Amino acid sequence: MKAYERLMRYARVHTSSRDGGDAVPSTACQFDLARLLAEEMTALGVSDVYLDEKNCYVYGKIPATPGLEDKPCIGFLAHVDTIPDEDFSGRNVQPRLVENYDGGDIPLGDSGRVLSPKAFPHLAGLKGCSLVVTDGTTVLGADDKAGVAEIMTAAEELLHGELPHGPVAIGFCPDEEIGHGAALLDLDRFGAQLAYTLDGAGVGEIEYENFNAAAAEVTFRGFNVHPGSAKNTMINASLVAMAFNAMLPAGDTPRDTEGYEGFFHLTDMTGNVESATLHYIIRDHDSNAFELRKKAMLHAAALLNDRYGACTVTVAMHEQYRNMIEKIKPHFEVVEKAMEATRQCGLEPKPCAIRGGTDGAQLSFRGLPCPNLPTGSFGHHGPYEHAVVEQMDQCVALILRILEAFTR
């Protein structure tokens, strides 16, 4: 089975995670795909297949071919969840294959939405390729079911082909989209010495740097009195919230930044005169700049508390993940092998920094060096998400070439 065919099959399984709460997985529906994968792995001949019935992690092994048992065990991971449904639905996904793409606009079902090169300039270079697209009403779920599909397809080729390889570990995780991801992956059961996540975009890209990340909930306590007698008395929590946001650098937003530039991202806001709440995510590749961003929020809160009274503004902040590069550098062969394999696939490696996070960041800090590889999918987290069939095939080939590189 081709990788894109697996993607279209997996995409129809609802696996949206959900913010809030302590349960792992955050949604029971993620087990539907996890069980499907465990059954498929067993049918393919993957050994030591195990589904964690409590936390929804899937494990499997492919033994080394004779004579290569002493090679390092290389792991490949992807996540089964898609973004929470309140962001954009992952329910009732209807993937469609567009063959021999003509390079123009693609109407997405009857939604009125159009996948266009004007919004996604890389489409201009995909003329003649085949794309998997949505019907315009849901995400596709290629983040990260494309990665899942590519790992499964590579496993099938290893088990039914003749490529010499060392031991291979396979893992699928829940809840990556809400920042939990690989936190409970059993590293002893997984058994890899080096690993790769497949959770990226265009072929050739190799990611071993990511944002330092934190989330902040900022609450505002107002004082509500009749507006006719509010002089020097009323504290409008919503206006204080607006003043707080205005104290942050106006140009440090996702829309205005790229590359290694960090940002403050206001993700949600509610409020009235009595109370208001702002939710932010804070991102920066540079650890010192990251700390300064957190201090800037606390400073803004302190200024407003001086103006309106103690406890008017409260900032609750927690870190989500750190930049993996500091853990990757001492084991840089994991990147060098990926670059070598990329060249073997006829592509030029393009090291780039992730403007986000990945399970690989968590795993690297847990002692398993784990850069990120592409999946050939784009436009994630919305109805314009799409995957390129030919690039998915190249991602499968990349897995095989990496394993080949570790035998030399």
Image (cartoon, helix red, strand yellow):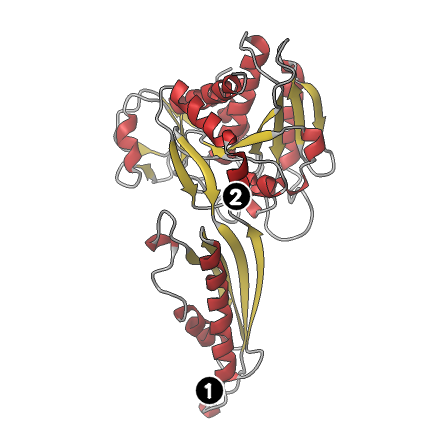
Rendered residue at 43%/20% (across/down):
393
Q: Quadrant of residue 345?
A: top left
User: Horizontally, is 115 left or right of 279 in the view?
Assistant: left
The spot of residue 369 in percent (x, y) is: 57, 36
Q: Where is mark 2, residue-wise?
A: 324
For the view shown, which residue lies furthest in the front direction?
330
Under tag 2, what secondary structure? Answer: loop
Instruction: Kindly tell me whether residue 329 is visible in this rendering.
Output: yes
Total marks shown come to: 2
The spot of residue 207 in percent (x, y) is: 45, 37
Rendered residue at 35%/64% (across/down):
250
Against 98, residue 163 (above or below) is: above
Q: Quadrant of residue 116?
A: top left
Q: What residue type is labelled 2?
A: Met
Under tag 1, what secondary structure? Answer: helix
User: Horizontally, is 117 left or right of 61 in the view?
Assistant: left
Q: How many residues crowd around disc 1 within 10 Å: few (fewer than 14), some, or many (20 or more)?
A: few
Give me the disc on residue 227. 1
The spot of residue 392 in percent (x, y) is: 43, 24
Instruction: Kindly tell me whether residue 9 is visible in this rendering.
Output: no
Q: How many residues crowd around disc 2 within 10 Å: few (fewer than 14), some, or many (20 or more)?
A: many
The spot of residue 67 in percent (x, y) is: 63, 9
Give me the disc on residue 218. none
Q: What residue type is labelled 1?
A: Pro
